[in-house]
Image (cartoon, coloured by chain):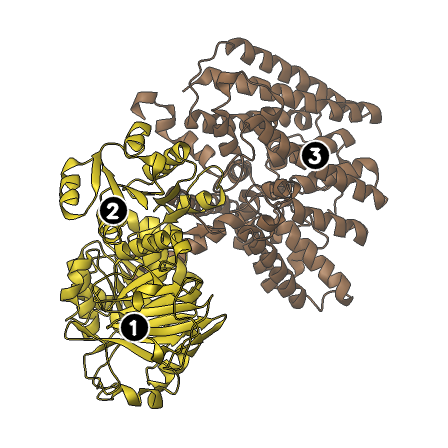
Amino acid sequence: MNFKMIGRFLAQIISIEAVFLLPALGISLGCGEWDAVKGFAYTLVIMLSVSAVLYGLCRKAGKLFGAREGMVCVSFSWVTLSLLGCLPFWISGQIPSFVDALFEIVSGFTTTGASILSDVESLSKGLLYWRSFSHWLGGMGVLVFLLAVTSGSEKEKGFTMHLLRAESPGPDVGKLVPKMKQTAMILYIIYIVMTVINVIFLLAGDMPLLEAVCTAFGTAGTGGFGIRNDSAAGYSPYIQNVTMVFMLLFGVNFSCYYLLLLGQFRSVFKDEELRLYIGIVIVAVGLIAWNIRDLYNGAEETLRHAGFQVASIITTTGYSTTDFDLWPSFSKSILLMLMVVGACAGSTGGGIKVARVLLLFKILRRNIRQVLNPKKVQVVRNNGRPIDEKILDNTNAYLAAYVIIVIVSFLIISLDGFSTGTNISAVLACFNNIGPGLEAVGPTCNFGAYSIGSKLVLIVDMLAGRLEIFPILVLLSRGTWSRRSQR
Amino acid sequence: MKIIIAGGGKVGRTLARQLASEGHDLTLIDRNNGILQTAVERYDAIAIAGNCASKDLLLQAGVGSADLLIAATNADEVNLLCCMTGHGLNPKLHTIARIRNPEYTEQIMTMQEVFPVSMTVNPERQAALEIERLLKFPGFLRRDYFAKGRTQIVELRVDSKSKLCNVSLSDLSGIVKCKVLVCAVLRAGTAVAPSGNFVLREGDRIFVTAPTADLTVLLKNLGIITRKVRKVMLCGGGRVSYYLASLLEKDGISVQILEMEYSRCVELAQLLPRTAVIHDDCSSQSVLEDQGISECDALVTLTGVDEINMVVSLYGGSRGVPQIITKLSRGENSSIADSMALGSIICPRELCCNNIVRYVRAMQNQTGAAVSVHSIADGQAEAVEFLVDETTQNCNIPLKQMKLKPNVLVVSITHGAQTQIPNGDSVFAVGDTVVIVTSGRGVLQQMNDIFA
């Protein structure tokens, strides 16, 4: 294990985080929130010193950097990012418990949007900004950002693929262009441009600047931290519609946008994953709108609420315009299923991913046919191209790991004595990076009532969900820590 | 013409035999001296041993004064390089390359300035095209095309249930209700040029000339049910299978391929999205039953072993598969095959050679030579297509007034877009395409050779 190289990456990531902390500090200074300023200032000092020490220790790193270093590096980065990122909340005293602060920031970085705060509006502006910004940074991935901005020396470039693979969601991660740095830059440029457009649209709806920026961060990262207690319910229908559309847009594979920029419209519209994603959204909105038709006045309101909630849940954002916990159970079941499906691979959303669901169904179909004719040789295809058996194996293993983690987490947090519906939806909401669940963790409630142990389990779930399980699981494998030759 | 043939494999030797018999000057090139020895003994040609893609060897073979270079070694890349080198040495040279890899074919034809190849031949693809044509018109054992596809000679088998059984040829037009001509009958292995009172018997294979437009009428009136082929089983997963399956997929026919080797199965499954690829031994009867051979509309045996193909085809016939097509890589076996119910027989090598021979004749066309020659009735007769030009004798004279050689029959005259089955009053004019069937030994070089 090349710890020095990982240390160097960590040092770089911490300094990036420190830089991103500055705007939040500025906002707090401008608003005169002195306890928040104290929190940010102390955190900055801690970050810079940790970064400097790590960099000093790991200056001379070896070159060996393989898949397992990539995995471990990504998990370490996210844990470090969270441990340091929660300090402002804790030091400022606005979230007195360290675990609560950690839960809040992990929920931010993993773009979950689950909160332990019952009164969001009491938080100071700088901290609210930092909380929402964590969504934006976590959405595309901080290591991808690092790859986009650093210019590693020639010899380092090949292995950075391991980092992208470990951090980006989806069954089959590839580069858009031959150079890793450019791939990362393209992703971030698309991301930034779309976020800016979103902010402009929100400003056009008479939203204050800070609120618009925070809402856009939550939408872009598909996070879902609102800065009002009622999430998005208090906004005008225009803002709700804008947010709904942008949530759906950020749930699409970003390589689709790149292809659109290149003018390859045909391959985008023929993309099976995109079609299925759109299909699921339309069917889910239709079914829910029909199911809740008596709850609201008029078709427009019904459709808007159904559409917003579906968009919010399938893209794993977690904003809400209404308390969907009061909906009939058929609609709630649909939302629960959408939680598991999640957004497209290569987007900022979480969940199993539409691409994996598609593959799993194709594998299932193949296996059923295999039973009927065992000698038949079949290839699973996506967009007409055959898919490597290894990817299919990984997808199956992913599903198995997914189910196991859900069950184990559910078992542990059941110790707190909440209802089954609360517990299962809490686990799904955290693991799929959504945010609100049902019943006691529904859109109007929060996770504050859970015990410290349960919160820690949910924190691990959020990280595992964001990093697609394996980077977290390999930390538990003995092979990761043994010497290279004994793997 | 001076022709260089590079590669003394099956195609090379068949070509040498055919082209030498038509009087061309042949030079054979091959790496293997032994093959050349036998070739020189058998065909009238000279032979050079060595690498056909090398400049020195091509010069030695007289590429500077040659008219045509045919590269038919077993490696596509060598064939291509050979043609390119030959063209570099003699820009007026025509080149034909055997290219079997489908990935190359298209780029060669579209990038003519880079690849100076006049024609590429792909025996497997031609075989697949031929089989596809047969599957589209079930009921014919074989179809040959003339006059740019306007005229065809189709082969039919007369069995006991056929309407043609025990019918004399003069009554034929009353049954089929369209103008057709039986130009040859193969009875018990011998070709007969039938006259009007010839009576068809069970087991005869007849060769019928008809305008392409009348074929459906012919089939309908003969009571041959043109059941549309919906499900085809291919035995063996070689190149022909791949080409055929991709053609049939486009036609919306459901295809099943049986192949022994697992890695090839995976390859095929990746290439052919709508084909069912089955990893099993097609020579086992229980496997064929499991895969539903009796529900298939057609069975095509395409393994690399002729014997397996024959056995599987026989089994398919016994299970009542309506149409059977058998691939035989050695044409000389087809005389044995004739006595068995193997359905249509396809020989990729011969198809390929016919194609090249046609090209050679087209090169000579300025002098009134045959446009194309198809050997029918197991090679005992030939159907030859000629273009009537100013040098042709007896233009605009009714056929009954001409003196034709014995065993020569004018079977179709195409004037513009109009194809006519001729009678005694028919005439041909300059610019017409004429198809002639001959069972004579000598080869017809010129149109004027038919006149006595």
Q: Is residue A248 left or right of residue A11?
A: right
Q: In terms of sequence position, does the residue under pointer 2 or pointer 1 come before the other?
A: 2
**On screen, residue B114 above or below A35:** below
Residue drawn at point x = 80 percent, y = 54 percent: A237
Estimate the x, y position of residue B251 in percent, counting from the top left.
Answer: 43, 65
Estimate the x, y position of residue B316 in percent, counting from the top left.
Answer: 21, 70
Q: Hey, which quadrant is residue B338 in on the image?
A: bottom left
Query: How many residues crowd around disc 1 within 10 Å: few (fewer than 14), some, or many (20 or more)?
Result: some
- Number of numbered labels in the structure image: 3
Towards the viewer: B136 or A437: B136
Give the letter of the yellow chain: B
Which label sits in the foreground, 3 or 1?
1
Q: Hey, which quadrant is residue A144 in on the image?
A: top right
Residue A17 in view in this figure: yes
Q: Colour of chain A?
A: brown
**On screen, residue A224 above or below A5:** below
Q: Which three-letter amino acid code belongs to the residue tagged 3?
A: Ile
* Secondary structure at numbered mark 2: helix
The answer for how far apart the CA atoms under marks 2 and 1 are is 35 Å
Q: Which three-letter amino acid code belongs to the residue tagged 2?
A: Gly
Estimate the x, y position of residue A364 in percent, counting from the top left.
Answer: 40, 56
* Secondary structure at numbered mark 1: loop
- For disc 2, the marked residue is B12
